[in-house]
Amino acid sequence: MVTIDSQLSAVVSLAGVSFVNVSVTVEEQSLDGPLAEVEHRLRTAAISDDMTKAVRQMYRRCRIDPTKTRPSSEALLRRVRRGDSLPRVNSIVDVCNWCSVESQIPFGLYDLDNIHPPIDFRMGREGEAYAGIRKEAIHVANRPVLVDGQGPFGNPTSDSARTMVRNATTSVLIVIFLPVEVEPARRTAVLDIVTERCVEFTGAKLEQRWGA
């Protein structure tokens, strides 16, 4: 579904899943318990940060300083460990944040109806940018970025306003940005978990799965 530029394929590996018939619910109460449990576990259990370190190294190999431009997964993990709750947006966003913070891997979530194939994953070019979600323009020159027929729309740090999930969204694309060294079994496990949770908590129907 996504073509990876050769400049990035030695550093970043992509996996993903798309769903239709998604029911986007604000304040999905069935997620309250699972999210509280993962927050508690991340604060109190002895959990390895090896994947966070691997993602940081992936950023450095892309010439990005991960202490200045944090992977979305690490931003969530730091938020939880300082005592804050995961942000609650809607059912599908909350599920993706749950899977991302738990796996320590960046996820991108996009409304498929607002994506115009083909989709490429490449280094951004001079002058390229997109409107962030509740943010100013995200400049992506010399940074890894997803691009469709209308231009750039997402990266492992920030999604775009153009392709963001809204309450009326019914079909979504989830892209998982993995260090290329991640073993196939772990990739498959992450895809299994996000697929299972999207079906359970949003009523989604699996359309396509790739990269496992």
Image: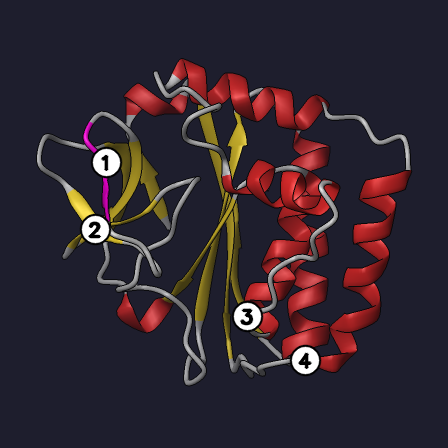
Give the amino acid type for the residue marked by disc 3 in the picture.
Val
Taking the spot 68% from the left edge, 80% from the top edge, the residue there is 28
Membership of 138 in magenta stretch: yes
Disc 3 to disc 2, C-alpha distance: 21 Å
Of the image marks 2 and 1, the number of the one nearer the N terminus: 2
* Residue at the extreme left of the image, as rendered: 127
Give the amino acid type for the residue marked by disc 4 in the picture.
Glu
Disc 4 to disc 2, C-alpha distance: 29 Å
Disc 1 to disc 4, C-alpha distance: 33 Å
Of the image marks 1 and 4, the number of the one nearer the N terminus: 4
Q: Which residue is mark 1?
A: 140
Q: Which residue is mark 3?
A: 89
Q: Tags 1 and 4 in contact by the CB under 8 Å rule?
A: no
Picture coordinates of residue 176 (x, y %)? 52, 44
| Disc 1: CA contacts within 10 A as few (<14), some (14-19) or many (>=20) | many
Q: Residue 63 vs residue 205: left or right? A: left
Q: Is residue 129 above or below residue 141?
A: below
Q: Tags 3 and 2 in contact by the CB under 8 Å rule?
A: no
Which of the 4 image quadrants contains residue 3?
Answer: top left
Helix, strand or loop at mark 4:
loop
Q: Which residues are magenta?
A: 137-141
Give the amino acid type for the residue marked by disc 2 in the picture.
Tyr
Q: Tags 2 and 1 in contact by the CB under 8 Å rule?
A: yes
